[in-house]
Image (tube, grey):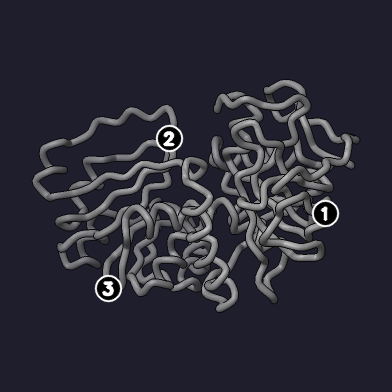
Amino acid sequence: MKAAFLDAVGAPDVLKYGDLPDPAPKAGDIRIRVAAAALNPIDTYIRAGVVKMQLPTPFITGSDVAGTVDAIGPDVKRFKVGDRVWGSNQGLLGRQGTCAEFVCASEEFFYSTPPGVSDDEAAAVALVGITAHLGLLQRAKLHAGEIAFVNGGTGGVGSMVVQMAKAVGAKVIATVGSDEKAKLCKSWGADCVLNYKTDDIPARIKEFTQNQGVNVWYETQREPDFFKMVDLMARRGRMIVMAGRQAQPTFPVGPFYVKDLALHGFAMFNATPDEQRTCANDINRWLAMKKLHMHIGKTFKIAEAAAAHRFLEDNTLQKAGTLTGKVVLHP
């Protein structure tokens, strides 16, 4: 099969494109003929060696995938050949990734693709959708009538936070960096969209919440400002952090605990398969109901994986501003 792979970590140019042996399913495994693979920042961190993980050699890049079951191993119970599926958690913790013609992995990481949902949408929703759900609903337990805030309302995770919060009946405040992104965020139902370049964010949040504060703050930025966050939280509010591996910000302990606040940190790949399947069940239901919309910002061929990694890094690390939505790769 053709695949995008590396033999050693480094800059995007370490990614090669060429032939590797077709994988064969073992007990409990399904083999998927890949239709789409989505790119996430974690994929670039692993390729660069910033996130240290045990990697097979050669190592196929990519976490997310959607396609059709091509073969099954012994003891597979949930899928059959011909089923359309999507999933994440590949390319992590010693597992091979998804930027290839075939992916072979445990069925516990995969979910049926709903009718009417494209493979591009299913691949694009995978890691970011599960991440948003874990933080917003399983950790923070957002419920109807509450107010959620998210930085970067059109980013991968941020766009999912906006839409999932609306799906459960909450109100949403989100930040964006342009009028075009504000229009997109509003189309997903965001109640208050603020431009972080021009708006006085704290003042506008206090105005929208009538000085009562935010119930759930979902922080997607790498360097959280906890002084600002704590000041803008409602009593017994919940804060979520899931980015910024090297960040060590100052934390206002006193203001935090006198408000009865809670802080949750998590990494998606630490969640059990059962926990992630709970997320996927809601995601599939909302996709089928058209309550979740995936914005595909740019597509590449898997043969162009190095260029895709450079493009994503330009936007996540260099703040180029040339990407709105997800990067998807095709065989």
- The residue where tag 2 is placed is 244
Q: CA distance from mark 3 to mark 1?
A: 46 Å
Q: Earlier in the sequence, mark 3 or mark 1?
A: 1
Q: Which of 181 and 108 lies nearest the eye of the viewer?
A: 108
At numbered mark 3, what does the secondary structure look like: helix, strand or loop? loop
Are the residues flagged by discs 3 and 1 in contact, CB closer than 8 Å?
Answer: no
3 or 1: mark nearer the eye: 1
2 or 3: mark nearer the eye: 3
Q: Given the image, on which type of amino acid does mark 2 rest?
A: Gly
Instruction: Work out whether 258 lies above or below 180.
Output: above
- The residue where tag 3 is placed is 145
- The residue where tag 1 is placed is 71
Q: Given the image, on which type of amino acid does mark 3 rest?
A: Gly
Instruction: Work out whether 207 lies above or below 89.
Output: below
Residue drawn at x 21%, y 54% is: 233
Q: Which of 163 and 286 lies nearest the eye of the viewer?
A: 286
